[in-house]
Amino acid sequence: MNYYDTVRILVYLLAAAAAAQTAHYQFAFDQDALSGAPDLSHLNRALAAADRLFIRNGHFTRVGEDLVRNTEDDERIRLFGVNLAFGANFPEEKDAVRIARRLRRLGVNLVRLHHMDTQPDSSAANAGSILTTGPFPSLNPIAVSRLRTFLDALKAEGVYCNLNLKVGYVFRPAVDGVPPHPAFPTQSKPLHIIHPRMVELQTEFTRKVIDALRLRDDPVLAMAEIENEASLVREWQSSNLDRNLAGDYRSIFTDQWNAFLKAKYSSTDELRAAWGASEPDGPSMLTGNWIIERSSDANGTLERVEGEAVPTLRAVVTQKGARFIIKEVGFSIVESQPYVAEIELRIDATAGVTRNINMDVKQDVSPWRQMTNRTLTLTSQWQKFSMSITPTWGMDGVGRFGLYFEALDFPLYVRNWKLYPAGRRGLGASETLETANIGLVGETDIGTTSRTNDYLLFLADRDKAYLDAMLAAVRDSADPWVPVAGTQMSYGGLLNYDSHDALDYQDNHFYVDHYNFPNVSWDGRDWRMRDQSNAGSGMSAFQSMAAARQAGRPYTVSEFNQPWPNTCAAEIDPALSVFGAFQDWDSIMHFAYSHGRGWDDSVPNGFNINGDWTKFATVGQAAWLFRSDAIRAGLEPMRIPVSKDLRLRATREKRNGAIGGLLTAVFGFDPNSLFVHPAELVKDGEGEIPEAARRKAAAPYVSDTGETTYDPAARLFLIHSPKAAGVLGFPGGKKIAAGAIDVELAASARGFATIVLTPIDQAPLNESRRLLLTNPGHTLRTQPGSNPARPQRIINYPNTTDWWTLEPDQVGKPSGNLNSGSRPIWMERVEAYVTVRTPAARIAVYPLDGAGQRLAQLEARDIERVESGFRLHLQADGAPMSPWFEIVLE
């Protein structure tokens, strides 16, 4: 076990010990009765014609009462949103108004209508989709009617909508009139971009949906997204393109590729000269000397299979644990020299069973730096898997090629392993423009730089053709103002700047501690998490988002979460709201409010805010922090030029959404500078990268507005603006100052807190007379069948020390149900002392119930007058237990 593993496991064990001693109290919110201090309804007003949005100076803007763009009454707007998914988009008429009002009370002014197309209804009455199972696009009239009613309710409550178009629909050849495919890919991606008939059907769908919902010139339509998490450029970088190019789809794509080349080059000779000569491949560097690496709690065997025509290995995990790897080690990798890794694998399972394992190339010594990796889905049939690498750094005799499968419950068979230097390929001897027989550049093909660049530009061109066709359908059906995005920056990377050239804004997604499914994808009773804190782990997801923003366009993050039951998840919404406001983004959208119409289930499940009381207490504050003037945009934006050559290099190196790493490799960019200054990338910009982006920032990182501090060593993100104060992360036993507050955790607390103070009356904190103070803990459901009722515990995933899951509630499954559970809900008690610095002479502090109403105010013993204000004892013994408090000052 290496040093880093030891430290990580020690941290997890200490956290587990603290969690085991943490007290919980029962608490639930009443969303329909919410009023008083936490009610943010005043932020919204009913939408009218003056509220139609357009883009001005790179931001979303209200057109104003004169209904004319680019005039004096235009008003910039920020949008704090939530996602609805699947059937949640279609509430019954009796629920439409109350759900819209729930969202308004939370300060939400945008709903992203997501996964409307994914599960077409065989019965229209089900209303789980905008589609029926008729030929695409057959609209579901009941779902359409419900959604239009809901849009009217949202509009009355001042909530816009973000219309998602292509998300999850899977084309059916026999029904939709598209060519057959041996194994139609999930959500039809990326074939929906390639085939002309599919593109035509999607533009028809776009027009029909917008017409049926009567969205033309309707101010409720804030924006539209064409496709979710898909692009040809991304699929090539992620090794997901080649395996889906089969039959007519490959033929059509090859024809499109040859037409692209013929339009660019006048002759085969010109093309051959441009691409350059080919080079031969080198020999494999693997010797067949595979060995096992395992953690102390894991065990297994590795043996050669006799009687096979080619050398074959059989690996079996006999005891599951934290780590079980088979690997070859000891080879060298030369920087910038392309390599290809190949292997054939199968599992000894019955037909139809699949399992996932991981493959990578990395250092076999500290710091175990990884060059490339891939998740593999195995079946009972032999499959060939490949990865290509053009390394940006080298390894001298310490290379490692490994397979990771600590949770695999079937024997694994391995053969035909190779890792070899790849020769760069130009135009083949028999390939010509005239015969239109020039082959595609596969994901593991190593072309000359010019050949690869041409192929990447072709992929971006096909992405652009699809996006432009869909854009035209939106413009024709809605209006020429509505802002339109394509896909997310993390699904394509910098070449999205080219494919999205005609579109209006850029979007992105991220998750902190997303669920991991070690065996079967999305098995709700077999999942695990790291229980990772964002503030405690470097806030790298925030850095990745900030490093992708394109200058001159609105920037949105339409999905983010730190999903339940992560015990640090209360931090995500207020932290992102503050960081996003500082970076001057235009919208953030929590994923999700709900995935279905169980509006009153009131139990935490999956990604949903509805029932996740950990986050609920601070969502309203987060909305206000992002939408108001509480946090100023950074004063000194870093404008970073990204040339066409750089965009192509990023894609050749398969960086995808890892743009910050590219900027570091090329310019010496310091990602920690993003905590000090906002950033924007300038497509085809000129000049040098700003000195502030290269200069090594010194921790703790204080924003150039002086309103936030991030201290990675202390694992703390602090808010200290005139209108907001907060301590997010691990104060431990220390007294932490953050603007208008000091925070000290009591000995009973486990060391983590999300404590945020905001004014109810919109005044600066030192002038405010009414304040909202939140102090939520993590939440747990009740263990089914427990008597007396007790929380369903967070435990280690079986045979691991650094993965976590819920206590099982079904025999034979390792995890508690991720998707539903039992009440009552238990919230972690976070006992704390919070000093509120104020010139006020008197103070009254009211814990609030789940509807935001005052409970008995804190007694004198829990309020101490100090020199700078008042020191409050929150969640003290004998006091009403609550995650939020109203403070009244005189």
Image (spheres, grey):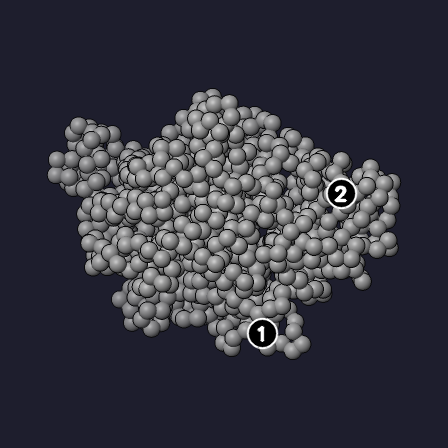
Check the picture and name the quadrant holding the N terminus.
Answer: bottom right
SS for tag 2? Answer: strand
Q: Which residue is mark 2?
A: 741
Q: Nearer the viewer, residue 725 or 667?
A: 725
**Residue 254 vertical placement versus 304 (above, below):** above
Q: Is residue 234 visible?
A: no
Q: Residue at x 46, y 26 (%)?
A: 66
Q: Which residue is mark 1?
A: 784
Q: Amino acid at mark 1?
A: Pro
Q: Residue at x 36, y 35 (%)?
A: 479
Q: Nearer the viewer, residue 369 or 811?
A: 811
Quarter-of-image position of residue 7: bottom right
Left or right position of 185 against 703: left
**Residue 628 vertical placement versus 801 (above, below):** above
Q: Amino acid at mark 2?
A: Ile
Q: Position of residue 611 (x, y in %)?
A: 57, 60
For the residues labelled 2 and 1, the Cα–Cα distance comes to 40 Å
Q: Residue at x 57, y 64 (%)?
A: 603
Tell which circle, 2 or 1, labels the residue nearer the N-terminal end: 2
Left or right position of 223 against 433: right
Q: Residue at x 70, y 55 (%)?
A: 853
Count neighbours of disc 2 (C-alpha within 10 A) and say few if under 14, some if 14 to 19, many if 20 or more: many
